[in-house]
Image: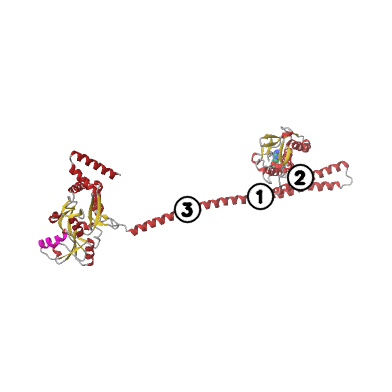
Protein backbone atom coordinates (compact mmCIF):
# COMPACT_ATOMS: atom_id res chain seq x y z
CA UNK A 1 0.00 0.00 0.00
CA UNK A 2 2.69 2.47 1.11
CA UNK A 3 4.87 1.56 -1.86
CA UNK A 4 1.96 2.02 -4.24
CA UNK A 5 1.02 5.37 -2.79
CA UNK A 6 4.69 6.44 -2.99
CA UNK A 7 4.63 5.45 -6.61
CA UNK A 8 1.50 7.47 -7.32
CA UNK A 9 2.89 10.48 -5.48
CA UNK A 10 6.03 10.29 -7.59
CA UNK A 11 4.08 9.94 -10.83
CA UNK A 12 1.89 12.87 -9.80
CA UNK A 13 4.95 15.00 -8.97
CA UNK A 14 6.42 13.98 -12.35
CA UNK A 15 3.27 15.07 -14.14
CA UNK A 16 3.24 18.43 -12.35
CA UNK A 17 6.92 18.97 -13.13
CA UNK A 18 6.27 17.92 -16.69
CA UNK A 19 3.54 20.49 -17.03
CA UNK A 20 5.95 23.08 -15.63
CA UNK A 21 8.54 22.18 -18.20
CA UNK A 22 10.79 19.84 -16.20
CA UNK A 23 9.95 16.89 -18.38
CA UNK A 24 13.44 15.28 -18.80
CA UNK A 25 13.80 14.51 -15.11
CA UNK A 26 10.20 13.41 -14.77
CA UNK A 27 10.52 11.11 -17.72
CA UNK A 28 13.78 9.69 -16.45
CA UNK A 29 12.37 8.97 -12.97
CA UNK A 30 9.33 7.29 -14.44
CA UNK A 31 11.49 5.25 -16.77
CA UNK A 32 13.60 4.01 -13.83
CA UNK A 33 10.60 3.00 -11.76
CA UNK A 34 8.90 1.15 -14.56
CA UNK A 35 12.01 -0.83 -15.62
CA UNK A 36 13.30 -3.95 -13.90
CA UNK A 37 16.91 -3.38 -12.85
CA UNK A 38 19.06 -6.51 -13.34
CA UNK A 39 21.82 -6.96 -10.76
CA UNK A 40 24.64 -9.52 -11.03
CA UNK A 41 25.45 -11.57 -7.94
CA UNK A 42 28.75 -13.44 -7.70
CA UNK A 43 30.50 -15.09 -4.82
CA UNK A 44 32.59 -12.71 -2.71
CA UNK A 45 31.35 -12.96 0.87
CA UNK A 46 30.64 -11.03 2.98
CA UNK A 47 30.26 -8.27 0.38
CA UNK A 48 28.05 -10.23 -1.99
CA UNK A 49 27.13 -13.90 -2.32
CA UNK A 50 24.31 -16.42 -2.60
CA UNK A 51 23.40 -17.67 0.87
CA UNK A 52 22.47 -21.24 1.87
CA UNK A 53 18.82 -20.59 1.01
CA UNK A 54 19.77 -19.56 -2.53
CA UNK A 55 19.07 -15.85 -1.91
CA UNK A 56 21.47 -12.98 -2.58
CA UNK A 57 23.07 -11.69 0.60
CA UNK A 58 25.91 -9.49 1.86
CA UNK A 59 26.79 -5.82 2.42
CA UNK A 60 26.10 -4.72 -1.19
CA UNK A 61 22.77 -6.55 -1.22
CA UNK A 62 21.78 -4.80 2.04
CA UNK A 63 22.66 -1.43 0.48
CA UNK A 64 20.82 -2.34 -2.71
CA UNK A 65 17.71 -3.40 -0.79
CA UNK A 66 17.76 -0.14 1.16
CA UNK A 67 18.00 1.91 -2.05
CA UNK A 68 15.34 -0.10 -3.90
CA UNK A 69 12.95 0.24 -0.95
CA UNK A 70 13.59 3.94 -0.74
CA UNK A 71 13.25 4.56 -4.47
CA UNK A 72 10.66 1.93 -5.27
CA UNK A 73 12.94 0.11 -7.73
CA UNK A 74 12.19 -3.32 -9.12
CA UNK A 75 15.28 -5.52 -8.83
CA UNK A 76 16.01 -8.85 -10.49
CA UNK A 77 19.11 -10.77 -9.38
CA UNK A 78 21.24 -12.69 -11.88
CA UNK A 79 23.65 -15.19 -10.32
CA UNK A 80 26.97 -16.14 -11.95
CA UNK A 81 30.73 -16.04 -11.54
CA UNK A 82 32.76 -12.87 -11.78
CA UNK A 83 33.97 -13.21 -15.34
CA UNK A 84 30.55 -14.26 -16.71
CA UNK A 85 28.82 -11.34 -15.05
CA UNK A 86 31.62 -8.99 -16.11
CA UNK A 87 30.95 -9.74 -19.77
CA UNK A 88 27.17 -9.64 -19.24
CA UNK A 89 27.55 -6.10 -17.84
CA UNK A 90 29.71 -5.21 -20.80
CA UNK A 91 27.01 -6.48 -23.21
CA UNK A 92 24.22 -4.74 -21.30
CA UNK A 93 22.56 -8.07 -20.36
CA UNK A 94 22.65 -6.92 -16.76
CA UNK A 95 22.45 -3.35 -15.52
CA UNK A 96 24.47 -3.32 -12.34
CA UNK A 97 27.43 -5.22 -10.98
CA UNK A 98 28.05 -4.47 -7.28
CA UNK A 99 31.48 -4.60 -5.66
CA UNK A 100 33.66 -3.46 -8.54
CA UNK A 101 37.01 -1.75 -7.99
CA UNK A 102 37.75 1.21 -10.23
CA UNK A 103 40.39 1.00 -12.95
CA UNK A 104 41.01 3.15 -16.02
CA UNK A 105 40.38 0.20 -18.27
CA UNK A 106 37.03 -0.56 -16.54
CA UNK A 107 36.09 3.12 -16.66
CA UNK A 108 36.01 2.88 -20.42
CA UNK A 109 33.64 -0.09 -20.23
CA UNK A 110 31.27 0.93 -17.39
CA UNK A 111 29.93 3.79 -15.34
CA UNK A 112 30.68 3.83 -11.61
CA UNK A 113 28.69 4.98 -8.61
CA UNK A 114 30.44 6.83 -5.86
CA UNK A 115 32.53 4.49 -3.67
CA UNK A 116 30.59 2.23 -1.33
CA UNK A 117 33.47 0.61 0.57
CA UNK A 118 37.20 1.20 0.88
CA UNK A 119 39.23 -1.88 0.32
CA UNK A 120 42.77 -3.19 -0.10
CA UNK A 121 44.37 -6.43 -1.11
CA UNK A 122 45.64 -8.70 1.61
CA UNK A 123 47.71 -11.89 1.50
CA UNK A 124 46.22 -14.93 3.28
CA UNK A 125 48.05 -18.20 3.90
CA UNK A 126 48.08 -21.25 6.20
CA UNK A 127 50.48 -22.25 8.98
CA UNK A 128 52.44 -24.32 6.41
CA UNK A 129 53.86 -21.15 4.90
CA UNK A 130 55.50 -18.11 6.51
CA UNK A 131 55.03 -14.79 4.76
CA UNK A 132 56.32 -11.69 6.55
CA UNK A 133 57.22 -9.44 3.64
CA UNK A 134 56.45 -9.15 -0.08
CA UNK A 135 59.78 -10.82 -0.99
CA UNK A 136 58.61 -13.99 0.83
CA UNK A 137 56.19 -14.48 -2.09
CA UNK A 138 59.16 -15.45 -4.28
CA UNK A 139 58.57 -18.79 -6.05
CA UNK A 140 55.20 -19.18 -4.30
CA UNK A 141 51.98 -20.31 -5.94
CA UNK A 142 49.43 -17.51 -5.58
CA UNK A 143 45.66 -17.90 -6.02
CA UNK A 144 43.49 -14.98 -7.20
CA UNK A 145 39.91 -14.45 -8.37
CA UNK A 146 39.69 -14.76 -12.15
CA UNK A 147 39.17 -11.41 -13.90
CA UNK A 148 39.56 -9.43 -10.69
CA UNK A 149 41.83 -6.41 -10.23
CA UNK A 150 44.08 -8.54 -8.02
CA UNK A 151 44.73 -10.82 -11.02
CA UNK A 152 46.26 -7.96 -13.01
CA UNK A 153 47.89 -6.51 -9.96
CA UNK A 154 49.63 -9.76 -9.00
CA UNK A 155 50.50 -10.72 -12.58
CA UNK A 156 52.17 -7.41 -13.42
CA UNK A 157 52.49 -4.68 -10.78
CA UNK A 158 54.00 -6.65 -7.90
CA UNK A 159 56.30 -8.69 -10.13
CA UNK A 160 57.63 -5.54 -11.80
CA UNK A 161 57.84 -3.33 -8.72
CA UNK A 162 59.56 -5.89 -6.51
CA UNK A 163 61.37 -7.78 -9.19
CA UNK A 164 60.36 -11.18 -7.83
CA UNK A 165 58.95 -14.25 -9.51
CA UNK A 166 56.00 -16.46 -8.57
CA UNK A 167 53.17 -18.20 -10.36
CA UNK A 168 49.56 -16.93 -10.36
CA UNK A 169 46.57 -19.33 -10.41
CA UNK A 170 43.09 -18.01 -11.16
CA UNK A 171 39.84 -19.35 -9.68
CA UNK A 172 36.19 -18.75 -10.50
CA UNK A 173 35.38 -18.15 -6.84
CA UNK A 174 37.01 -17.60 -3.48
CA UNK A 175 35.55 -20.90 -2.41
CA UNK A 176 37.59 -22.78 -5.04
CA UNK A 177 40.76 -20.91 -4.13
CA UNK A 178 40.28 -21.76 -0.42
CA UNK A 179 39.95 -25.47 -1.28
CA UNK A 180 43.15 -25.28 -3.35
CA UNK A 181 44.95 -23.53 -0.46
CA UNK A 182 43.85 -26.14 2.06
CA UNK A 183 44.90 -28.97 -0.28
CA UNK A 184 48.34 -27.34 -0.62
CA UNK A 185 47.91 -26.74 -4.38
CA UNK A 186 48.72 -23.07 -3.77
CA UNK A 187 50.67 -21.34 -0.97
CA UNK A 188 48.72 -18.09 -0.57
CA UNK A 189 45.54 -16.35 -1.62
CA UNK A 190 45.49 -12.66 -2.52
CA UNK A 191 42.00 -11.39 -1.79
CA UNK A 192 40.37 -8.15 -0.81
CA UNK A 193 40.27 -7.37 2.90
CA UNK A 194 36.63 -8.36 3.26
CA UNK A 195 37.55 -11.95 2.63
CA UNK A 196 38.72 -12.01 6.27
CA UNK A 197 35.11 -11.46 7.43
CA UNK A 198 33.63 -14.25 5.32
CA UNK A 199 32.86 -17.73 6.64
CA UNK A 200 35.41 -19.10 4.15
CA UNK A 201 38.23 -17.57 6.19
CA UNK A 202 38.21 -20.09 9.03
CA UNK A 203 40.86 -20.87 11.67
CA UNK A 204 43.09 -22.70 9.17
CA UNK A 205 43.51 -19.57 7.07
CA UNK A 206 45.82 -16.91 8.48
CA UNK A 207 45.81 -13.24 7.40
CA UNK A 208 49.36 -11.92 6.86
CA UNK A 209 50.48 -8.34 7.47
CA UNK A 210 50.98 -7.71 3.76
CA UNK A 211 48.46 -5.28 2.36
CA UNK A 212 48.60 -3.65 -1.07
CA UNK A 213 46.68 -1.55 -3.53
CA UNK A 214 44.29 0.60 -1.59
CA UNK A 215 41.12 0.92 -3.62
CA UNK A 216 37.43 1.75 -3.47
CA UNK A 217 34.64 -0.57 -4.55
CA UNK A 218 31.57 0.73 -6.32
CA UNK A 219 28.38 -0.28 -8.05
CA UNK A 220 29.34 -0.57 -11.74
CA UNK A 221 26.61 0.24 -14.26
CA UNK A 222 26.42 -0.87 -17.87
CA UNK A 223 27.33 1.93 -20.31
CA UNK A 224 23.85 2.27 -21.75
CA UNK A 225 22.09 2.67 -18.40
CA UNK A 226 19.90 5.68 -17.73
CA UNK A 227 22.25 8.22 -16.04
CA UNK A 228 19.41 9.17 -13.67
CA UNK A 229 19.76 5.75 -12.04
CA UNK A 230 23.42 6.41 -11.24
CA UNK A 231 22.48 9.79 -9.76
CA UNK A 232 19.81 8.09 -7.72
CA UNK A 233 22.35 5.58 -6.38
CA UNK A 234 24.88 8.30 -5.57
CA UNK A 235 22.26 10.30 -3.70
CA UNK A 236 21.27 7.24 -1.64
CA UNK A 237 24.85 6.09 -1.01
CA UNK A 238 25.68 9.58 0.29
CA UNK A 239 22.74 9.68 2.65
CA UNK A 240 23.36 6.08 3.84
CA UNK A 241 27.01 6.84 4.57
CA UNK A 242 26.20 10.11 6.32
CA UNK A 243 23.72 8.60 8.73
CA UNK A 244 25.38 6.46 11.46
CA UNK A 245 22.07 4.70 12.10
CA UNK A 246 21.39 3.84 8.46
CA UNK A 247 21.00 0.36 6.94
CA UNK A 248 24.57 0.70 5.66
CA UNK A 249 26.14 0.82 9.13
CA UNK A 250 23.74 -1.81 10.48
CA UNK A 251 24.89 -4.06 7.65
CA UNK A 252 28.61 -3.39 8.31
CA UNK A 253 28.13 -4.15 11.99
CA UNK A 254 26.36 -7.37 11.12
CA UNK A 255 28.90 -8.66 8.60
CA UNK A 256 32.08 -7.50 10.35
CA UNK A 257 31.21 -9.20 13.61
CA UNK A 258 33.68 -11.98 12.87
CA UNK A 259 34.01 -13.27 16.41
CA UNK A 260 30.32 -13.73 17.02
CA UNK A 261 29.63 -17.09 18.54
CA UNK A 262 27.62 -19.07 16.10
CA UNK A 263 25.61 -21.81 17.76
CA UNK A 264 25.42 -24.79 15.43
CA UNK A 265 21.92 -25.68 14.24
CA UNK A 266 22.06 -29.16 15.81
CA UNK A 267 22.86 -27.53 19.17
CA UNK A 268 19.92 -25.13 18.83
CA UNK A 269 17.67 -28.11 18.08
CA UNK A 270 19.13 -30.00 21.01
CA UNK A 271 18.44 -27.04 23.31
CA UNK A 272 14.87 -26.71 21.95
CA UNK A 273 14.21 -30.45 22.39
CA UNK A 274 15.76 -30.47 25.88
CA UNK A 275 13.79 -27.36 26.91
CA UNK A 276 10.62 -28.94 25.58
CA UNK A 277 11.43 -32.19 27.41
CA UNK A 278 12.08 -30.25 30.60
CA UNK A 279 8.83 -28.34 30.17
CA UNK A 280 6.87 -31.58 29.62
CA UNK A 281 8.62 -33.14 32.62
CA UNK A 282 7.79 -30.13 34.82
CA UNK A 283 4.20 -30.16 33.60
CA UNK A 284 3.97 -33.89 34.27
CA UNK A 285 5.46 -33.41 37.76
CA UNK A 286 3.00 -30.61 38.49
CA UNK A 287 0.02 -32.64 37.30
CA UNK A 288 1.27 -35.62 39.29
CA UNK A 289 1.78 -33.52 42.40
CA UNK A 290 -1.69 -32.06 42.00
CA UNK A 291 -3.22 -35.52 41.59
CA UNK A 292 -1.31 -36.92 44.57
CA UNK A 293 -2.47 -33.94 46.66
CA UNK A 294 -6.09 -34.48 45.63
CA UNK A 295 -5.84 -38.24 46.33
CA UNK A 296 -4.17 -37.60 49.70
CA UNK A 297 -7.00 -35.25 50.62
CA UNK A 298 -9.61 -37.87 49.69
CA UNK A 299 -7.70 -40.51 51.71
CA UNK A 300 -7.34 -38.14 54.67
CA UNK A 301 -11.05 -37.33 54.59
CA UNK A 302 -11.87 -41.04 54.38
CA UNK A 303 -9.48 -41.69 57.25
CA UNK A 304 -11.18 -39.04 59.34
CA UNK A 305 -14.58 -40.53 58.53
CA UNK A 306 -13.32 -44.00 59.45
CA UNK A 307 -11.86 -42.73 62.73
CA UNK A 308 -15.19 -41.04 63.50
CA UNK A 309 -17.10 -44.21 62.63
CA UNK A 310 -14.72 -46.27 64.77
CA UNK A 311 -15.11 -43.87 67.70
CA UNK A 312 -18.89 -43.97 67.26
CA UNK A 313 -18.87 -47.78 67.14
CA UNK A 314 -16.69 -47.91 70.26
CA UNK A 315 -18.95 -45.42 72.02
CA UNK A 316 -22.01 -47.36 70.94
CA UNK A 317 -20.45 -50.58 72.17
CA UNK A 318 -19.58 -48.99 75.49
CA UNK A 319 -23.11 -47.60 75.84
CA UNK A 320 -24.66 -50.94 74.93
CA UNK A 321 -22.62 -52.69 77.65
CA UNK A 322 -23.67 -50.00 80.15
CA UNK A 323 -27.24 -50.35 78.91
CA UNK A 324 -27.24 -54.14 79.38
CA UNK A 325 -25.86 -53.79 82.91
CA UNK A 326 -28.50 -51.15 83.62
CA UNK A 327 -31.31 -53.21 82.13
CA UNK A 328 -30.46 -56.31 84.10
CA UNK A 329 -30.59 -54.15 87.19
CA UNK A 330 -33.88 -52.58 86.05
CA UNK A 331 -35.44 -56.01 85.50
CA UNK A 332 -34.03 -57.46 88.71
CA UNK A 333 -35.59 -54.71 90.89
CA UNK A 334 -39.27 -55.38 90.05
CA UNK A 335 -38.52 -59.13 89.86
CA UNK A 336 -37.19 -59.06 93.43
CA UNK A 337 -40.31 -57.12 94.40
CA UNK A 338 -42.57 -59.74 92.84
CA UNK A 339 -40.71 -62.72 94.37
CA UNK A 340 -40.48 -60.99 97.77
CA UNK A 341 -44.17 -60.15 98.05
CA UNK A 342 -45.25 -63.53 96.62
CA UNK A 343 -43.16 -65.11 99.45
CA UNK A 344 -44.96 -62.94 102.01
CA UNK A 345 -48.35 -63.93 100.53
CA UNK A 346 -47.58 -67.58 101.42
CA UNK A 347 -47.94 -66.69 105.15
CA UNK A 348 -51.15 -68.55 106.28
CA UNK A 349 -52.16 -66.12 109.02
CA UNK A 350 -51.95 -63.06 106.75
CA UNK A 351 -54.75 -60.52 107.28
CA UNK A 352 -56.99 -59.70 104.30
CA UNK A 353 -55.79 -56.09 104.31
CA UNK A 354 -52.09 -57.03 104.08
CA UNK A 355 -52.88 -59.62 101.44
CA UNK A 356 -54.50 -56.92 99.26
CA UNK A 357 -51.51 -54.57 99.79
CA UNK A 358 -48.98 -57.27 98.79
CA UNK A 359 -51.02 -58.23 95.71
CA UNK A 360 -51.11 -54.54 94.66
CA UNK A 361 -47.31 -54.30 95.07
CA UNK A 362 -46.83 -57.48 93.00
CA UNK A 363 -49.07 -55.96 90.31
CA UNK A 364 -47.10 -52.67 90.33
CA UNK A 365 -43.77 -54.46 90.00
CA UNK A 366 -45.21 -56.61 87.21
CA UNK A 367 -46.45 -53.51 85.35
CA UNK A 368 -43.05 -51.81 85.74
CA UNK A 369 -41.32 -54.88 84.36
CA UNK A 370 -43.71 -55.08 81.43
CA UNK A 371 -42.97 -51.42 80.66
CA UNK A 372 -39.25 -52.06 80.64
CA UNK A 373 -39.59 -55.15 78.47
CA UNK A 374 -41.85 -53.20 76.05
CA UNK A 375 -39.25 -50.45 75.81
CA UNK A 376 -36.45 -52.94 75.20
CA UNK A 377 -38.48 -54.61 72.44
CA UNK A 378 -39.22 -51.21 70.83
CA UNK A 379 -35.58 -50.17 71.00
CA UNK A 380 -34.36 -53.42 69.47
CA UNK A 381 -36.92 -53.07 66.65
CA UNK A 382 -35.78 -49.49 66.01
CA UNK A 383 -32.11 -50.59 66.09
CA UNK A 384 -32.69 -53.41 63.60
CA UNK A 385 -34.75 -51.10 61.33
CA UNK A 386 -37.75 -53.44 61.02
CA UNK A 387 -40.36 -50.90 62.06
CA UNK A 388 -42.89 -49.75 59.45
CA UNK A 389 -44.99 -46.60 59.39
CA UNK A 390 -48.74 -47.05 58.90
CA UNK A 391 -50.33 -43.78 57.89
CA UNK A 392 -54.03 -43.14 58.49
CA UNK A 393 -56.27 -40.14 59.20
CA UNK A 394 -56.32 -39.30 62.88
CA UNK A 395 -58.22 -36.83 65.02
CA UNK A 396 -55.72 -35.06 67.26
CA UNK A 397 -58.29 -33.84 69.78
CA UNK A 398 -59.43 -37.43 70.37
CA UNK A 399 -55.85 -38.61 70.82
CA UNK A 400 -55.13 -35.87 73.38
CA UNK A 401 -58.30 -36.77 75.27
CA UNK A 402 -57.25 -40.43 75.27
CA UNK A 403 -53.77 -39.64 76.66
CA UNK A 404 -55.37 -37.42 79.30
CA UNK A 405 -57.82 -40.14 80.35
CA UNK A 406 -55.17 -42.84 80.63
CA UNK A 407 -52.73 -40.74 82.70
CA UNK A 408 -55.10 -38.60 84.80
CA UNK A 409 -55.02 -41.09 87.65
CA UNK A 410 -51.19 -41.12 87.79
CA UNK A 411 -51.22 -37.29 88.00
CA UNK A 412 -53.87 -37.31 90.70
CA UNK A 413 -51.83 -39.83 92.73
CA UNK A 414 -49.02 -37.22 92.83
CA UNK A 415 -51.39 -34.31 93.41
CA UNK A 416 -50.48 -32.79 90.08
CA UNK A 417 -52.88 -30.69 88.03
CA UNK A 418 -53.02 -32.33 84.54
CA UNK A 419 -54.74 -30.45 81.71
CA UNK A 420 -54.71 -30.38 77.90
CA UNK A 421 -55.46 -27.74 75.28
CA UNK A 422 -57.10 -28.30 71.86
CA UNK A 423 -57.28 -24.94 69.96
CA UNK A 424 -58.91 -26.40 66.78
CA UNK A 425 -62.45 -27.73 66.41
CA UNK A 426 -62.71 -31.49 65.79
CA UNK A 427 -63.22 -31.25 61.99
CA UNK A 428 -60.04 -29.25 61.56
CA UNK A 429 -57.88 -31.23 63.96
CA UNK A 430 -57.17 -33.98 61.42
CA UNK A 431 -53.76 -35.26 60.29
CA UNK A 432 -52.53 -38.29 58.45
CA UNK A 433 -49.99 -40.15 60.56
CA UNK A 434 -49.18 -43.39 62.40
CA UNK A 435 -51.60 -43.08 65.39
CA UNK A 436 -49.92 -45.79 67.49
CA UNK A 437 -46.53 -44.12 67.25
CA UNK A 438 -48.12 -40.72 67.90
CA UNK A 439 -49.80 -42.04 71.05
CA UNK A 440 -46.55 -43.62 72.19
CA UNK A 441 -44.65 -40.30 71.74
CA UNK A 442 -47.20 -38.09 73.48
CA UNK A 443 -48.00 -40.48 76.35
CA UNK A 444 -44.29 -41.02 76.97
CA UNK A 445 -43.69 -37.27 77.25
CA UNK A 446 -46.67 -36.80 79.58
CA UNK A 447 -45.55 -39.83 81.65
CA UNK A 448 -42.07 -38.28 81.94
CA UNK A 449 -43.62 -34.93 82.95
CA UNK A 450 -45.56 -36.68 85.74
CA UNK A 451 -42.46 -38.68 86.68
CA UNK A 452 -40.13 -35.66 86.93
CA UNK A 453 -42.60 -33.22 88.55
CA UNK A 454 -43.26 -33.19 92.30
CA UNK A 455 -45.76 -30.34 92.53
CA UNK A 456 -47.53 -27.95 90.22
CA UNK A 457 -49.13 -28.44 86.80
CA UNK A 458 -48.67 -30.38 83.62
CA UNK A 459 -50.25 -29.07 80.48
CA UNK A 460 -50.10 -30.48 76.97
CA UNK A 461 -51.58 -29.37 73.66
CA UNK A 462 -50.75 -28.25 70.13
CA UNK A 463 -50.49 -25.28 67.79
CA UNK A 464 -51.31 -25.17 64.07
CA UNK A 465 -48.15 -24.21 62.12
CA UNK A 466 -49.31 -24.36 58.49
CA UNK A 467 -48.14 -27.64 57.00
CA UNK A 468 -47.49 -29.17 60.40
CA UNK A 469 -48.73 -29.29 63.97
CA UNK A 470 -46.45 -28.41 66.84
CA UNK A 471 -47.21 -30.36 70.05
CA UNK A 472 -45.96 -29.47 73.51
CA UNK A 473 -45.87 -31.02 77.00
CA UNK A 474 -45.16 -28.45 79.71
CA UNK A 475 -44.39 -29.23 83.34
CA UNK A 476 -43.25 -27.41 86.49
CA UNK A 477 -40.84 -30.20 87.41
CA UNK A 478 -37.16 -30.60 88.22
CA UNK A 479 -35.94 -29.40 84.79
CA UNK A 480 -32.90 -30.60 82.81
CA UNK A 481 -29.39 -29.11 83.02
CA UNK A 482 -28.43 -27.18 79.85
CA UNK A 483 -25.51 -29.46 79.00
CA UNK A 484 -27.74 -32.56 79.07
CA UNK A 485 -30.65 -31.29 76.99
CA UNK A 486 -29.20 -32.78 73.77
CA UNK A 487 -27.91 -35.97 75.36
CA UNK A 488 -31.24 -37.13 76.78
CA UNK A 489 -32.40 -37.98 73.26
CA UNK A 490 -29.32 -40.10 72.54
CA UNK A 491 -29.60 -43.86 72.77
CA UNK A 492 -29.03 -45.40 76.20
CA UNK A 493 -28.29 -42.03 77.88
CA UNK A 494 -30.05 -40.72 80.95
CA UNK A 495 -29.75 -37.17 82.23
CA UNK A 496 -27.56 -37.15 85.31
CA UNK A 497 -30.19 -36.91 87.95
CA UNK A 498 -29.08 -37.71 91.43
CA UNK A 499 -32.22 -39.68 92.40
CA UNK A 500 -32.44 -41.65 89.18
CA UNK A 501 -33.52 -44.83 90.96
CA UNK A 502 -36.24 -43.01 92.80
CA UNK A 503 -37.71 -41.94 89.45
CA UNK A 504 -37.41 -45.44 88.02
CA UNK A 505 -36.17 -44.45 84.60
CA UNK A 506 -34.42 -46.81 82.20
CA UNK A 507 -33.41 -43.99 79.86
CA UNK A 508 -35.23 -45.40 76.81
CA UNK A 509 -38.40 -43.36 76.51
CA UNK A 510 -36.96 -40.28 74.78
CA UNK A 511 -34.79 -42.37 72.50
CA UNK A 512 -37.88 -44.24 71.32
CA UNK A 513 -39.86 -40.98 71.06
CA UNK A 514 -37.21 -39.31 68.92
CA UNK A 515 -36.92 -42.35 66.64
CA UNK A 516 -40.72 -42.34 66.16
CA UNK A 517 -40.91 -38.56 65.56
CA UNK A 518 -38.20 -38.80 62.91
CA UNK A 519 -39.99 -41.75 61.27
CA UNK A 520 -43.05 -39.49 61.00
CA UNK A 521 -40.92 -36.72 59.38
CA UNK A 522 -40.99 -34.45 62.44
CA UNK A 523 -38.53 -32.96 64.93
CA UNK A 524 -38.29 -33.11 68.70
CA UNK A 525 -36.57 -30.75 71.15
CA UNK A 526 -36.78 -29.43 74.69
CA UNK A 527 -36.66 -26.05 76.44
CA UNK A 528 -35.96 -26.45 80.11
CA UNK A 529 -34.71 -24.65 83.23
CA UNK A 530 -33.52 -26.52 86.27
CA UNK A 531 -35.94 -26.45 89.24
CA UNK A 532 -38.49 -24.54 87.15
CA UNK A 533 -39.68 -27.06 84.62
CA UNK A 534 -39.42 -28.33 81.06
CA UNK A 535 -41.40 -28.02 77.85
CA UNK A 536 -40.94 -30.75 75.28
CA UNK A 537 -41.95 -29.94 71.67
CA UNK A 538 -42.39 -32.14 68.63
CA UNK A 539 -43.78 -31.55 65.15
CA UNK A 540 -45.83 -33.84 62.90
CA UNK A 541 -46.65 -32.93 59.24
CA UNK A 542 -50.34 -32.79 58.30
CA UNK A 543 -49.74 -35.05 55.28
CA UNK A 544 -53.32 -34.54 54.07
CA UNK A 545 -52.39 -33.95 50.41
CA UNK A 546 -50.81 -37.39 49.95
P1 LIG B 1 -36.34 -42.49 81.63
O1 LIG B 1 -36.91 -43.82 81.52
O2 LIG B 1 -35.07 -42.41 82.38
O3 LIG B 1 -37.30 -41.44 82.00
P2 LIG B 1 -36.28 -41.12 79.14
O4 LIG B 1 -35.58 -41.44 77.86
O5 LIG B 1 -37.73 -40.96 79.05
O6 LIG B 1 -35.84 -42.21 80.16
O7 LIG B 1 -35.65 -39.79 79.68
C1 LIG B 1 -34.28 -39.64 79.68
C2 LIG B 1 -33.89 -38.69 80.78
O8 LIG B 1 -34.35 -37.36 80.48
C3 LIG B 1 -34.50 -38.99 82.10
O9 LIG B 1 -33.75 -39.92 82.81
C4 LIG B 1 -34.52 -37.65 82.79
O10 LIG B 1 -33.27 -37.37 83.39
C5 LIG B 1 -34.70 -36.67 81.66
N1 LIG B 1 -36.12 -36.24 81.51
C6 LIG B 1 -37.04 -36.71 80.63
N2 LIG B 1 -38.21 -36.02 80.75
C7 LIG B 1 -38.02 -35.11 81.73
C8 LIG B 1 -38.85 -34.09 82.33
N3 LIG B 1 -40.12 -33.85 81.93
N4 LIG B 1 -38.34 -33.34 83.32
C9 LIG B 1 -37.06 -33.52 83.72
N5 LIG B 1 -36.23 -34.46 83.20
C10 LIG B 1 -36.71 -35.26 82.25
Q: CA distance from mark 2 to mark 1?
A: 23 Å
**Residue contact at pointers 3 and 1, CB within 8 angstroms:** no
Disc 2 CB within 8 Å of nearest ligand 1 atom: no
| Sequence-first tag of 3 and 1 | 3
Q: Earlier in the sequence, mark 2 or mark 1?
A: 1
Ligand 1 quadrant in view: top right
**Depth order, front residue of 2/286:** 2
Q: Quadrant of residue 277?
A: bottom left
Which quadrant: the N terminus? Answer: top left
Instruction: Reply yes or no: does residue 185 show up in magenta.
Output: no
Image: 169 above or below 486: below
> Ligand 1 within 8 A of label 1's CB?
no
Secondary element type, mark 2: helix
Residue 378, visible in the rendered structure:
yes
How many marks the image carries: the answer is: 3
Which residue occupies the extreme front position in the image? 19
Reading the image, the residue beneath label 2 is 371
Q: Residues within 10 Å of mark 3 (few under 14, many from 20)?
A: few
Q: Nearer the viewer, mark 3 or mark 2?
A: 3
Horizontal arrangement in the rendering, residue 37 relative to residue 456 (left or right): left
Residue 342 picture location, percent across and down = 83, 47
Q: Is residue 529 visible?
A: no
For label 1, the residue is: 316
Q: Residues within 10 Å of mark 1 (few under 14, many from 20)?
A: some
**Going 81% across and 47% down the picture, which residue do you hit?**
338
Magenta span of residues:
150-161
Apparent side of residue 533 relative to residue 358 in the rendered image (left or right): left
Task: Determine which residue is flagged by label 3.
Answer: 287
* Res. 474 image quadrant: top right
Amino acid sequence: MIMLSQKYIKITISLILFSLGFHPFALAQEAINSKIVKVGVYDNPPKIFMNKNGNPDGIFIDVLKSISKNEDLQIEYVAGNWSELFSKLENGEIDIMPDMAYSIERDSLFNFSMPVLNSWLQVFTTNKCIINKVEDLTNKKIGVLKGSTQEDFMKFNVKNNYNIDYSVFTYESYYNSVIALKKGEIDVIVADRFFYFSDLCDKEILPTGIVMQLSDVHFAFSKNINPALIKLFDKNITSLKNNPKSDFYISLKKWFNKNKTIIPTYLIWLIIILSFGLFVFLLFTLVLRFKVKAKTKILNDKNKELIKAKEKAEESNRLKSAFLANMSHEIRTPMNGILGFVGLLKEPKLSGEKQQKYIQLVEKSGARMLNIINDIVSISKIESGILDVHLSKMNINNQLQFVYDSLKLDADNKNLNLSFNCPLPEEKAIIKTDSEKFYSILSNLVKNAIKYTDKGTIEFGYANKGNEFEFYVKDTGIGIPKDRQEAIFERFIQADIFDKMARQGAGLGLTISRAYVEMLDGKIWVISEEAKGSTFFFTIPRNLDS
